[in-house]
Amino acid sequence: MTTWLPAFQIIFLSLFLQGIPFLLIGSFLGAAISVFVPIRSLASRLPKSKIGGILIGTFAGLLIPSCECIGVPLVRRLIRNGLPPATAIAYLLASPVLNPVCLASTWIAFQYDNPLMAVLTRAGGAAFLAVSVALIFSRLPVGNIFRSGIVANDEPAGEAGLWENPPAAWLANKTPRLAAAISTGFSDFFGIAVYYLLGCLIAAVVQTALPPYAIPNTSPALLIPGFMGLSVITSLCSSADAFVAKSFAGYPLAALFAFMWLGAVLDLKLIFIYQSVFKRRTVLLLALLLAALVFALSLLAAYLPLERLFYGTTISG
């Protein structure tokens, strides 16, 4: 057997199997919301200011938790049902980190250092990225951002939702609504799973082809891009990447947080999944924006330096 094949199989299956359940959950959660929740009515109650809607989207993950795999199908369905695009983009980028599971895992990973500062640093960086990108995208024409059919003009069937129907009327129509939710969930899942499969394949090929990744502990300007590249290649789940980042003991904290900040919103599988919602040039713009913002934020953290906030002193690598 070819020597690289077993490694490729293990990496591909681990990436594919860890994400598929969450992709399925996201698809059916989005479908259930589109059938039972009046998205357009709720969207009309959002703050009229652009920044207000973006801030709500940024912190909505604390109430509606999702990881990066759940977020894409969920946001795709929410946008189709009338959620403002800027609010949806903010939720998409913030929710992989600003959710209880990810914040708890970050706390545990850094429990012997300064867990509160670790959580605040990671959450603050995620919020900065989400708000910045959502504000930039809010200035672009919607037709230039999303794929055809993502932003619907007509009121979807079932938009009235559970909250706008008397209980007796809803019970009478429960079976058709559940059938619609299940059908929509499967449709969304298979539509996005193709992109996810391609992303996992590419990530597995890249990880198999590259030699064991050793990053020289050099200046932050060189070290940070190395950790950013590593986060894109490894394609880890945001709920577990803090443990991997913490395993790189001896490297500056700015590099470790660059790994976590970027990996939660951009990796090889996500580049393909994003294409189920965004146009290809939008995905390229999104990737460049995220990389530039994470690099700038991490470089700022390196020269504060971040160690002073964590430990009260500067720790050299």
Image (cartoon, rainbow, N blue to C red):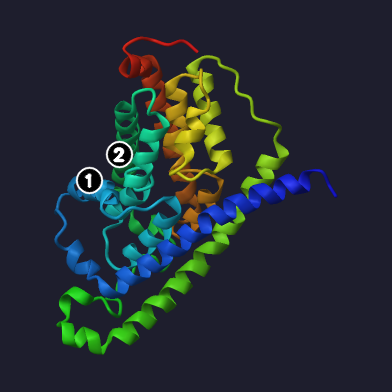
Say which label, 1 or 2, has the lower sequence index. 1
**Compared to 179, does 282 lie above or below?**
above
The location of residue 20, given as percent across then percent down, is 52, 59
The location of residue 140, given as percent across then percent down, is 33, 50
Mark 1, residue position: 55
Tag 2's secondary structure?
A: helix
Mark 2, residue position: 127
State the residue in front, 131 or 152.
131
The location of residue 76, given as percent across then percent down, is 39, 62
State the residue in front, 116 or 155.
116
Tag 1's secondary structure?
A: helix
Q: Quadrant of residue 299?
A: top left
Q: Residue furthest right?
A: 1
Q: Residue at x 56, y 46 (%)?
A: 268
Contact (Cβ within 8 Å) of mark 1 with mark 2: no
Is 276 left or right of 10, judged from the image as shown?
A: left
